Amino acid sequence: MAISLFVVLLTGIVLIVLMRSGSIKTGPVVVAVLFGFLPASTGSGPDIQEFPDEMAESISALGT
């Protein structure tokens, strides 16, 4: 759960920085945020969440 919160915050910060720098407009930021919520509410939500969880476990296993 902590990794998921970190990823959400990191992508949110990246979107804000891109929007503030003028690289991306407000419309695409809104679409990106909404796209993040839509797959989570479908039946494939658990499968989508499994991928970053597995990546986090793999990365943490490298350190041990």
Image (tube, grey):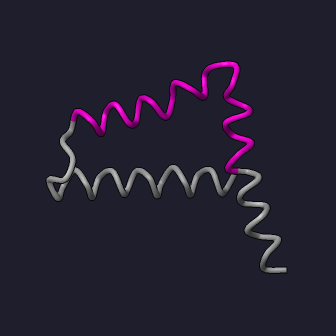
Location of residue 46 by image quarter: top right
Disc tally is 0
| Residue at 67% across, 50% down | 52
Residue that lies at the very extreme toward the left in this rendered image: 22
Reply above or below: 42 against 10: above
Q: Is residue 40 found inside the magenta-colored segment of the image?
A: yes
Image location of residue 42, percent across then percent down: 63, 19
Q: Is residue 47 found inside the magenta-colored segment of the image?
A: yes
| Residue at 67% across, 29% down | 45
User: Which residues lie in the magenta part?
Assistant: 27-52
47 displayed left or right of 11:
right
Location of residue 33 by image quarter: top left
Image location of residue 28, percent across then percent down: 27, 36
Query: In front: 3, or 25?
Result: 25
Residue that lies at the very extreme toward the bottom in this rendered image: 64
Reply above or below: 16 against 61: above
Q: Quadrant of the C terminus?
A: bottom right
| Residue at 36% across, 57% down | 14
